[in-house]
Image (tube, rainbow, N blue to C red):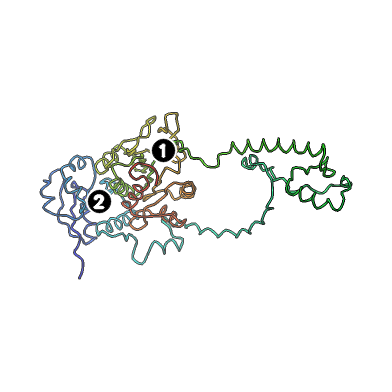
Amino acid sequence: MAAEPVRVALLARPGPARDRLRAVIEEAAVDCVLEADPGELEPEALVAAAPQLVLVALEAQVEEALERFDPVLFDPAVDVVYEEAELAAGREGWEVARWQRHLVAKLQRHGSVLPPGHEPEEDAAAGGGPGGMPEPPAPEPEPAVPAAEPEPAASPFDPVLAESGDEGFEPAPAFPPEPASGPVSREPVPEAEAGAEMETAARRPEVLSLDDGAGMAPGGADEAEARGRFERDLDILESRIAGLQLVDDAPPAAGPSGAVVVLAGIGGPDAVRQLLGALPPTLPRPVLVRQQLDGARYDKLVAQMQRISPLPVTLAQHGAPLERGVVHIVPPELGLAMTPDGPRFTTGGELLDVLPPGDSAVVLLSGSDPTLVDGLMKQRLAGALVVGQVAEGCYDPAASLALKNRGGDTATPVQLAARIADRWPGGGESA
């Protein structure tokens, strides 16, 4: 039995954007239960239409009217898809076909956005990333490292030099080397006493010492001098060992807190909305959203995200500090710089280099720059959570495919929000 078509309501002002969106609805073969200008529509009419999905053509007049429809737009059972009216009307050429394909997939509530006969894995295997970009080859396995030869069991060494990592440091030999030339200086020892002397020397190695590199001098004044040198060396060694901290029982010093960095480009605003809408309101870290926009209308993006985000949303400004539990929309000209008071936004700064990887997360959404993936994998090795939007349903999945090819994790925006929540559960410490 065929599934019932999705019930879709279109909220848009009359004009080219509305006409194009209506055409996509017809192509998707869904059930359009309502088409109206939200400035003239009564909220009760939208409720009565009982849509499963609401398609909104965003522009200034529409945004002002949307608040009246919050009972439907914030209903967990209703999907909401926002499209910029200006972009919907202005797309041309091949962009129109790709945009329509992605929007049809959203309206039909499935993730298949590729033309028939194509799958993301097939495209990746054929080197056919978006735009014909070849995917990087899988890394070659590292050659096996031969097992290291066992070191001598008894090898006295200076632990302070060893810990310092001095390349010139080598452990002292377990036994003195043979003299380069000349006989070993020894007094004749009766054969009966030789065994006892050797046993005593084995138990008390301190009585053995090199005599100017020429031999060993047991007993007498030389033995007393050797014992004195050994005891002095032992005192120095014990003092050095006492200064080493083998186990640190003290709590670690509080380091700088990290942040969640969300990177998105073409096709990203809808994914950003889904991600932010699913974040917990108690998230104890800042969220930085770097969304590439045509026309740089970031004030409008702030207003849109404020409607769906459980966290406060603000536009980043030069000199402003990072605030925990706040979503910062970060224009491309701004980055971060470390100051005595913590990280602050600054013109020309970088977003990722200032943040501690072990307490940060990076999310790659649709349209992210795939050339960032190599650097992000280093952040991942340093402890950062690096995840991406699953390619299915992603308008531009180049970065997500590159991340997946390198062993990274991808998921839907809502699932990514859950991963972020798991990283900082309850008390705010990284999991």
What residue would you read off at disc 2?
81
Tag 2: residue type?
Val
Tag 1: residue type?
Ser
Q: Residue 140: which numbered mark, if any?
A: none
Q: Are the two marked residues, 1 and 2, in contact with CB atoms closer than 8 angstroms? A: no
In the rendered image, the quadrant that contains the N terminus is bottom left
Q: Position of residue 36 (x, y in %)?
A: 15, 49
* Side of 121 where 140 appears, left or right: right
Mark 1 or mark 2, whichever is nearer to me? 1
Q: List the single residue furthest toward the front.
A: 192
* Side of 346 where 60 appears, left or right: left
**What is the distance, in whole Å, between disc 1 and disc 2 at their CAs?**
34 Å
* Residue 238, quarter of the rendered image: top right
Q: Height in image: 63 above or below 139?
A: above
Q: Secondary structure at mark 1?
A: loop
Q: Position of residue 405 (x, y in %)?
A: 45, 57
Q: Residues within 10 Å of mark 2 (few under 14, many from 20)?
A: many
**Between residues 200 and 285, which one lies in front from this camera angle?**
200
**Between residues 282 and 215, which one lies in front from this camera angle?**
215
* Side of 286 where 245 appears, left or right: right
* Residue 313, quarter of the rendered image: top left
What residue would you read off at disc 1?
257
